Amino acid sequence: MGKHHKLPFSPSYSYTHAPFDIVHSDLWTSPILSSTGHRYYILFLDDFTNFLWIYPLSHKSDAFSKFVHFNTFVQNQFGLSIKTLQCDNGREYNNSLFHTYCSNYGISFRFSCPYTSPQNGKAERKIRYINNVTRTLLLHASVPPKLWPHAVLMATYLHNILPSKSLSYTSPTLALYRKQPSYSHLRIFGCLCYPHIPTPHKLAARTIPCVFLGFPSQHKGYKCLDINSGRIFISRHVIFDESKFPFQQPNPPPAPSYEFLHDSPSPFIISHLTPILSHSPTSDLPHSPHIKHTAPISPLSHQPTAPAQPAASTSNLPAHHTTLTNHSTHPMTTRSKAGIFRPKPTYNLNSQHTNSPISSPLPKSHVDALRDPNWKSAMISEFTALINNKTWELVPRPSNANVIRCMWLFKHKYRSDGSLERHKARLVVNGKSQRPGIDCDDTFSPVVKPATIRTVLSIALSNNWPLHQLDVNNAFLHGFLDETVYMHQPPGFKDSSRPSDVCLLKKSLYGLKQAPRAWYHRFASHATKLGFHHSKVDHSLFIYHHNGATAYLLLYVDDIVLTASSPTLLRTLISQLGAEFSIKDLGLLTFFLGIAVTRRPGCLLLSQQKYATEIIHRAGMSSCKPTCTPVDTSSKLSADDGPPVADPTLYRSLAGALQYLTFTRPDISYAVQQVCLHMHDPRVPHFDALKGTLDYDLHLRPTTTAGLVAYSDADWGGCPDTRRSTSGYCVFMGDNLISWSSKRQTTISRSSAEAEYRGVANVVAELCWLRNLLLELRHPISKASLVYCDNVSAIYMSQNPVQHQRTKHIEMDIHFVRERVALGHVRVLHVPSRFQYADIFTKGLPRVLFEEFRSSLNVQSSHVQTAGEC
């Protein structure tokens, strides 16, 4: 009897299937009487959508009247009834009024056992969350504690707009209302604001400094507190200064008696507006260099005291970091030593698809998915495809076999315009548990090179060939396995007659380490049977030549670009591929690898504007003004400049995203190369260098010129930390830019001529590769490729066979270039620095020169019409 203790709680396995099946409720007591006379608040939490309502109370006895009000609100606004009310055993709930009311309305009343608060854990945990946010809001702006009801309502508002992990990272508002509110109205709680107020005469002030206290529940506007008078103004015409907080000032205005707010009449209403979910921006407000202004979004019109909400970004969440010791060389370090930790998930509100309500939120597990008709249909479709494909066969489980687990992954597939296309369920295996040499061997699989893609597109455009894009459904499922791999039966689809058997995989599945390689070999094998052969310089390029007919096929995992010399041949090849694989013909090439392709008369536009916009949103720079040039010409990035960034993981993520953006934006290659050099220890100046412009595309035009022309440049000793040089080049086929590079050299050069010559060697190697590629494409280059360099000494070294003591250490590069010059494959010529286009890849340029060189690279605004109507 003396050792009795509380027993552990088992996890809850109860699930709700609709809003208001279960409503959790609890009451919290404040240690401070509010300025409005409230001592308590009561919350109601919907179990299904996680949507929260909070009502401040003056007395505990008001709990019953608020519940009656809330129940009526639910019935009128949603046409639903509360089925179960879950609360604690307090007398404010466990009384005759509540029992009678719930009995009359058929509401199941569930109490937690006395002194057993974990049985009402969801409401208790939500109170903790709201109080944490409330405390933070008050302390950050030094708002007096007596104004806690305003902070509580603001915290509730933010809760309802934040993505929730329990809702598969959608917001409670989206889950309940199927609508995506706007977020531009959000402002910092407690900041300085200036509401427009009516004046007694034309010479009186039209505004006074106030404190922002959140959003009113019945107006589309802002709540603004006048500290001097204690009056609360409600207005939509508000200008904010979010850098100042009146309650934080060293000598703030005399604080009013906040009891006055309670004794005074109702707040002074300046503008009456109908609450709506979202709205267009307000008209222009007076401009101030230090003040921002935006039209507000009100709480949803159905809301009582707690405003309704949309999903907000958590991009400002802190990430752990550790200051690193910088060295001239970067030794390999582990992630823990480098202060690299698994990042907290961040979500961008602006990237959500506001025009397409999600019919079903992402399920938490396959059990939840099978309860939803949309996801169940997607799972059955995937499972049926696997069975029809004969992906596995059931066998008794062998002893000592490594049986791999599998799981279901769920995703919403969207169209290019952002609307919902379908619900996608995919069965994947846990490849981490595979053992090399036993159930997996080689895993490498080639992908097509960017220069190959641009070369093929340029040839197709010049010959006016049709360009089609194809998608292989469940591509990895077509690959045959050479290894013996066992897998557990898919969750939710076990064979009831053979529940202990396992799947012996005959074909690959997503998640297997060898799946990409198996798929490539299967496709290459079939393409060879159709008459294709893969290129020797790029194994993901397949070439077809037969009786004067030509076709090129580019393969990037399961995405295919196909072009042919005639529409008949194109249709024939698509039909032959479809006979072997489940091919979806997406029509003319419009979107490939995240790149929008637009064909206009006289040109082809390659654009990543949508991708670039998403990067800006991820960086939280949607409201920033773009810079004129991507690189500052007055200074260079150093490893020791500035303090470390707060979130190094975000820096690395953005740097990697920008690197992919250079596929169509060669003008930012140097800037991206510079920020990528500091990924081991990113600092604030490096993060500032991530800004740039968006509205530019790479233009390809028909060309009859088959020659290759290159520009090469180097910035001698340009790195302030290592004094290594940066070399860059660009290669044109006719008028089209097909290849470029910006890269720091691996060794230190002893002279500018040496740095330039190493750059020439790099571009000559690229030209050799491109010449071989064009030879395989039946477009051989008969004349020498031209390389323009602005360093006379480097040009002399490429032609003069005399060795010199100062250049013998770069003998290999010299012999390589001289050999190509002697063979007549390459000529190195001089170009004045004023026309050295490769400068854009090695250094920051002034605005006029940068814009001129960018235009020369055929990177132009998509809105500008040039020659050939492009």
Image (spheres, grey):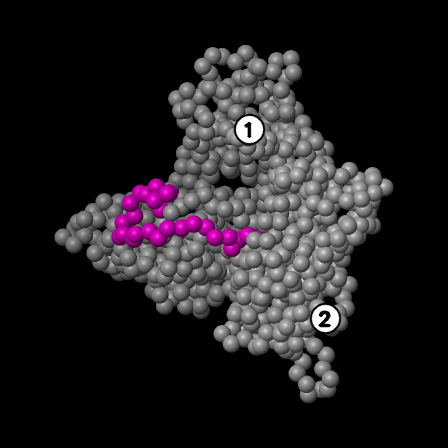
Q: Which residues are magenta?
A: 311-338
Task: Give the foreground label among 2 and 1.
Answer: 1
Instruction: Where is residue 73? Give x, y as percent.
Output: 80, 51
The structure residue drawn at horizontal position 61% and vertical position 58%, both measured from the top left corner, is 31
Number of marks: 2
Give the farthest residue toward the right.
104
Label 2 with label 1: CB-CB less than 8 Å:
no
Say which element carries label 2. Answer: helix
| Near-viewer residue (827 or 603) | 603
Residue type pointed to by label 1:
Met
Q: Is residue 93 left or right of residue 702?
A: right
Work out which quarter of the rendered image holds the C terminus and state it. Answer: bottom right
Judge by depth and name the residue closer to the eye, 263 or 479. 263
Above or below, comparing residue 418 to residue 484 in the picture? below
**What secondary structure is found at the residue carrying circle 1?**
loop
| Position of 843 relative to 732 (above/below) | below
Locate residue 633, reporting x and y percent. Answer: 38, 66
Please determine whether, in this image, residue 357 is positioned above or below residue 489.
Answer: below
Q: Is residue 846 magenta?
A: no
| Residue 687 in view (yes/no) | yes
339 with respect to 112 (left or right): left
Q: Residues within 10 Å of mark 1 (few under 14, many from 20)?
A: few
Q: Nearer the viewer, residue 367 or 494?
A: 367
> Residue tagged by mark 2?
263
Outermost residue on the left side: it is 805
**Magenta stretch, overall SS:** loop
- Residue 630 picture location, percent across and down: 44, 61
The residues tagged by marks 2 and 1 sit, at their Cα atoms, a distance apart of 56 Å
Mark with earlier residue (2, 1) = 1
Q: Which residue is mark 1?
A: 1
